[in-house]
Amino acid sequence: MPDGAMSWLEFFEPSGIPYAVAILVVTALAAGFVRRSYERLGERFADRRLVIQQTGALVRFVVFLSGFTGAALTLFKLEKELLLGIGGTFAVAFGFAAKDLAASVLAGIIILVDRPFQVGDRVTFEGYYGDIVAVGLRSVRLMTLDDTQVTIPNNKFLTEAVASGNAGAVDMMIQTDLFIGIDQDLAEARRLLTEVLTTSRYVNLNQKWSVTASEVIQESYFAVRLRAKAYVLDVRYEKAFETDVTERALAAFREDGIEPPAVLHRGV
């Protein structure tokens, strides 16, 4: 057996294995309890949900760090030789990954200080769209709307633009487009869409909203675009709000005889 392995085994305490396992199990249970507790708090106090999520992420980090440290202390005798060995190992590892790691750590500090986004924000970055679920010193984790977790190195955010839809707030502006023919009753269509928009159960009428119209070329033919813009009560309602407004507006259009754009000449 190599001398290096023998030197490490000299500091290993086999009798500490049961205690280390117990500490890790308790750590996992505690982290799960913290996660569930903060999730319930976020549901109960919806207006403070993002702050609660950020606090919960920090507490879980402290729990894991404490648990792993405690397990290590029960497995190894912390003597001068061991500390020197650990320091040498980390020095070698750091030497190989210093450039990327240093850039990611620096970027992580910048993100935490500058706060271009935070945990709970709904952002768009390099084609990905979803919620920020964790901001660490090395990477940011983003959960897309189809429940795909994307891990992005922090240093990417130093050179690429990131768009935050809610910027730390619970509510967020949503834009929904509908199209009708240029020969249809525009005033009536706007009235119907306004009624649908302002009666949606997901809309926050304490924030600004609007329904605008413009003539556009859609798929090589002329159409009138009706654009409804309003804030949802919670970013989690984004798709539900879009679906609700679209379904009810199209039903109202059909009932009132307002037709979609005609690709060919509309029959009389």
Image (tube, rainbow, N blue to C red):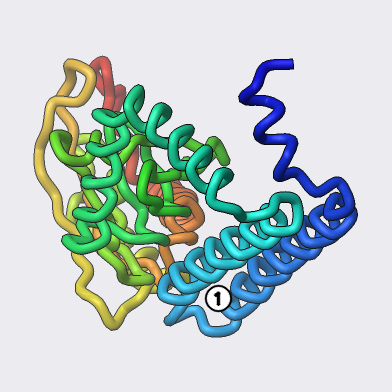
Q: Is residue 26 left or right of residue 50?
A: right
Q: 145 or 77: which is nearer to us?
A: 77
Q: Tell me where residue 10 appears, x and y as whole percent.
A: 73, 39
In this view, 262 is above or below 108: above
Q: Tell me where residue 119 appears, x and y as whole percent.
A: 40, 60
Q: Is residue 184 left or right of residue 58?
A: left
Q: Residue at x 75, y 58 (%)?
A: 74
* Count of numbered marks: 1
Q: Residue furthest left?
A: 215
> Does residue 234 appear in this view?
yes
In this view, 71 is above or below 142: below
Q: Is residue 67 left or right of residue 186?
A: right
Q: Tell me where residue 75 appears, x and y as whole percent.
A: 75, 51
Q: Which residue is mark 1?
A: 42
Where the N terminus falls, by quadrant? top right
Q: Residue at x 65, y 21 (%)?
A: 3
In this view, 44 is above or below 135: below
Q: 18 or 128: which is nearer to us?
A: 18
Q: 70 or 89: which is nearer to us?
A: 89
Residue type of the residue flagged with mark 1: Gly
**Within 10 angstroms of label 1, few (less than 14), some, or many (20 or more) residues?**
some
Where the C terminus falls, by quadrant? top left
> Does residue 251 appear in this view?
no
